[in-house]
Amino acid sequence: MFLALRDLRTAKGRFALVGGVIVLVAFLSAALSGLANGLVDDGISGLRKLPLTHLAFQPGSDANFSRSMLNETNLKPWRDALGNDASPLGVSFFNVRTDQGKTLDVSLFGTDPQSFLAHDQRARDALAGKPGIVLSSEMAELGIEVGDTLTVVGPDVELPVLGFTYGGTYGHADIAFTSLETWQNLVYGPNSKGRFSAVAIRDRQNHDLDSLAKESGTQVLTKSESYIGSPGFKAETSTMSLIRGFLIVIASLVVGAFFTVWTIQRTGQIGLLKALGATNGYVVRDALGQLAIILVIATGIGVLLASGAGVIVSGSAPFRMTLSSVGSSALLLIAAGMVGSLVALRRITSIPPDTALRDSV
Amino acid sequence: MNLELSNIGVTVADGEATLDILHELDLRVDAGEVVAIVGESGSGKSTLVATTGLLRAPTTGSVAINGQAVNDGSLSNKEIARLRHAEIGLVFQSANLFPSLTAMEQLELVAHLDGSLNADARARAADLLERVGMSHRASQRPGRLSGGERQRVALARALMNRPSLVLADEPTASLDASRGREIMALLAESGRESGAATVIVTHAPEQLAHCDRVLRLEGGRLRDALIPADV
């Protein structure tokens, strides 16, 4: 990259221009990636934090807790095989009203007080005692305190706040826990017949879960497979993927167009390099190296800017950046840029060396 | 080293017809010999340089360096590029220096092309710039050099890889008469010193005093030979 590096050094303005465009595309791509992750998080972070590995649903419910209804018959084979590592779980969305009259959305998880989901004795005691509600830790920031009473709108049942636990949301609503019995009363009234939404499973010994699912008349999914049932999850992720896909295509076209014009302008220079004895391989390596430097630096700046913007907006918008999502966005963008340059590369290899006699550089 | 062109013909498409640029052309240049080729504009001088410098293949005939034919299809494009790099030094009409490289880097690039850029190569580059009187301008880019200075750097670049053949295509065309004579003298002198065969194509017969032989290109053929004193 002898010539490429020196070209970059002297033609700063020209490279800054295309670099600026790539910075903007990288910024948008990384910011959208952060927003997509934030939205996904907002949809399933509460579920992700639960210490379960699998969920068994009613077949055909598409991992949607509202559509899935199971009972003791479905639970028994799981309990027989996994003991307390299989726990009934009820999940429903409710509005709750605070003492101050403020209405909040909650995703209410009803679980057995002895369940592995109640991760410490305090949580188990809270769920085993008189009916009450344990809120996600984020709700404490809304000024709700232990001992406050929340009224579940609809059944108009009053539940005291027993404590705070796992932070997180499900279906864009903060999660809250109650006992399975309380949840069944809220959803089905006194005639619940032991119904619940799904079986939460903690598989620590690689059981044959498919056989157990067949035996119990349920459909078993891994935790991450079950995210698809979160309301809006599929639409949100596919919309964000579509936008990111378009950005990648745009980046590829922008880089391809710049590189093609740059190559046309460099025709004399490339011909001269060949006249001096450079092979096609040398010229291509030089050109690709130059492009890779621009792409890597510009993408890095764009990603850094997006990270900074993410820190600023993280309090007011769902935004989460992970190393893997940022890394994959950046690599995809760099790869798209390199692919976009392929047309120009073909042109580079076809420039004859006698161009040096006709075109001055 | 010697260069031998035999029965060279170059034909190009001209619309639906064809045009013979070079026709049954023979040329032999021996090591250390300085040969000038003169001719009018459009007589095929640049095509002759391109063919001789392995920048383009002739339509017919053969180009041989040290008796080895290089256009008989036995060499790949990569091998021809390497041969061009190893054996041929080119000086162009407009110097053709890379705008982003300093005078020193123009020479270093030649060594970099085959991965031989090291301390020895840098020392040789510095020595060549000294020989053409450009060592004090080694860190300047072409934009800050005069036409004559650029052509001196171009000459030093052509000599960087110790070529067996130095080809100069109208090297004085963009210079005034005094600078032109200076460059011609440098070309001839460096060719003789290094033992390279030197071919200088020009349309300025008044600058041929340093050449051993002068050939005239007319209608695509080398028609007659004059000694420099007669020009």
Image (spheres, coloured by chain):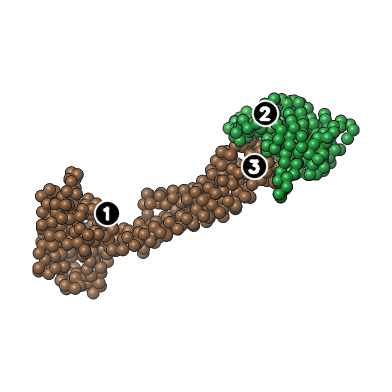
Give the quarter of the image for residue A111.
bottom left
Residue A50 coordinates in the image, percent (x, y): 22, 54
Q: Give amino acid for label 2.
A: Ala
Q: Colour of chain B?
A: green
Task: Give the chain letter for brown.
Answer: A
Write the residue at 25% across / 72% down: A103
Question: In terms of secondary structure, where does tag 3 sit?
Answer: loop
SS of the residue under disc 2? strand
Q: The numbered mark 1 sits on a residue in which chain?
A: A
Q: Name the residue under label 1.
A: A225
Q: Percent x, y for residue A325?
A: 38, 51
In this view, A317 is above or below A264: below
Distance (Cα) linking label 2 and label 1: 69 Å
Badge 2 vs badge 3, beta-carbon distance below 8 Å? no
Tell me the amino acid under the disc marked 1.
Answer: Glu
- Judge left or right: residue A261 versus residue A199: right
Q: Mark 2 highlights which residue?
A: B69
x then y, percent, for residue B68: 67, 26
The answer to whether residue A275 is visible is yes
Identify residue type, mark 3.
Pro
Whether residue B196 is situated above or below residue A274 in the rendered picture: above
Q: Residue at x 15, y 50 (%)?
A: A212
State the CA–CA distance, disc 2 to disc 3. 21 Å
Q: Helix, strand, or loop for circle 1?
A: helix
Residue B61 percent across, percent down from the top left: 71, 33
A192 left or right of A297 in image: left
Residues at discs 2 and 1 both on one chain:
no
Mark 3: few/some/many CA within 10 Å (<14, 14-19, 20+): some
Q: What chain does badge 2 belong to?
A: B
